[in-house]
Image (tube, rainbow, N blue to C red):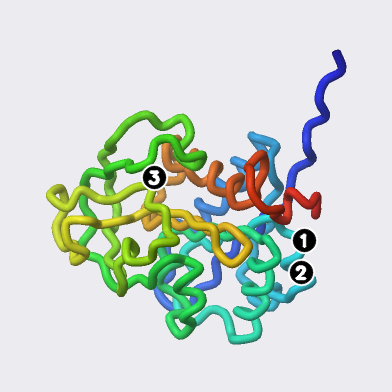
């Protein structure tokens, strides 16, 4: 029997502009995503910190955009509008760690990410509780909990109050100090959002995360899920064979 043709890799944009605190892990996180795309053959990665790329025509060529540790007011209103149009046309969004700390002037951006970052206590080791091991993004993960060292983000609003969010991982609040979200402390979630798909993880402050198979597997599956490769539902950019 003839082999089923492999779908050509789709394009992913990694965006890491900062106008506030700058994470030292940005270079290694970009390199890790590029290696992931090369190893799996699923996607090719373009990386930039130039916000001028946020125009409808340019964004239209990407299946998913990944915001890596973007801080401060890094997009102007026209660029946010271009991102909004992109998502509403089926584009995917993946936000990593400090992506929740930027563009606090934009209520829409906060809903895209799921919540705006408030503050974090000193980093320490704690326990992550996996809520949905059966979700595509958590594929291959059968453990119900995992020890993890990171900044344990608090948010300005409680993610659980937004019923559109599907929480994948929360923190065990008895295992770390400084949480202000009550006993329920969501840290990783996804959602169907205005025609597109969005994923956010509050994890990933340290370089070691991008060498961790468990964490990188989530990013891989999140990129695929937001791009709708092999997923049911509406037609995303990758499903429409935009390259």
Dot 3 corresponds to which residue? 208
Query: Where's the N terminus, which quadrant?
Result: top right
Looking at the rendering, which quadrant does residue 189 occupy? Answer: bottom left
Q: Is residue 142 above or below residue 160?
A: above
| Residue under the image location 25 percent in, 50 percent down | 171
**Number of the front mark, 3 or 2:** 2
Callout 3 touching callout 2 (CB < 8 Å): no
- Mark 1 → mark 2, Cα distance in angstroms: 6 Å
Dot 2 corresponds to which residue? 58
Closer-to-camera residue (216/190) = 190
Q: Residues within 10 Å of mark 3 (few under 14, many from 20)?
A: some
Q: Residue 122, percent across and down?
A: 21, 61
Relative side of 233 to 143, left or right: right
Q: Is residue 135 above or below residue 94?
A: above
Relative side of 186 to 121, left or right: right
Q: Tag 1's secondary structure?
A: loop
Q: Is residue 16 above or below residue 27?
A: below
Callout 1 touching callout 2 (CB < 8 Å): yes
Dot 1 corresponds to which residue? 61
């Amino acid at each position: 029997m003839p082999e089923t043709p492999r779908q050509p890799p789709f394009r992913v944009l990694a965006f890491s502009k900062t106008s506030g605190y700058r994470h030292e892990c940005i270079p290694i996180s970009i390199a890790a995503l590029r290696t992931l795309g090369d190893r799996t053959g699923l996607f090719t990665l373009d990386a930039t910190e130039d916000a001028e790329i946020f125009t409808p025509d340019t964004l239209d060529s990407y299946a998913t955009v990944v915001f890596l540790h973007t801080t401060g007011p890094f997009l102007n209103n026209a660029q946010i509008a271009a991102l909004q149009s992109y998502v509403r046309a089926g584009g995917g969004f993946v936000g990593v760690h400090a992506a929740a700390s930027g563009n606090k002037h934009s209520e829409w951006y906060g809903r895209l990410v799921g919540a705006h970052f408030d503050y974090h206590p000193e980093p320490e080791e704690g326990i992550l509780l996996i809520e949905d091991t059966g979700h595509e993004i958590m594929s291959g993960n059968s453990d119900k909990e995992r020890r993890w060292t990171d900044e344990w983000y608090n948010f300005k609003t409680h993610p659980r109050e937004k019923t559109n969010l599907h929480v994948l991982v929360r923190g065990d609040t008895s295992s770390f100090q400084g949480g202000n979200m009550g006993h329920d402390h969501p840290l990783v979630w996804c959602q169907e959002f205005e025609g597109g798909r969005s994923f956010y993880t509050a994890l990933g402050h340290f370089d070691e995360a991008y060498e961790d198979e468990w964490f990188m597997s989530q990013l891989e599956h999140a990129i695929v899920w937001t791009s709708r490769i092999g997923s049911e539902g509406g037609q995303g950019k990758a499903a429409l064979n935009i390259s």
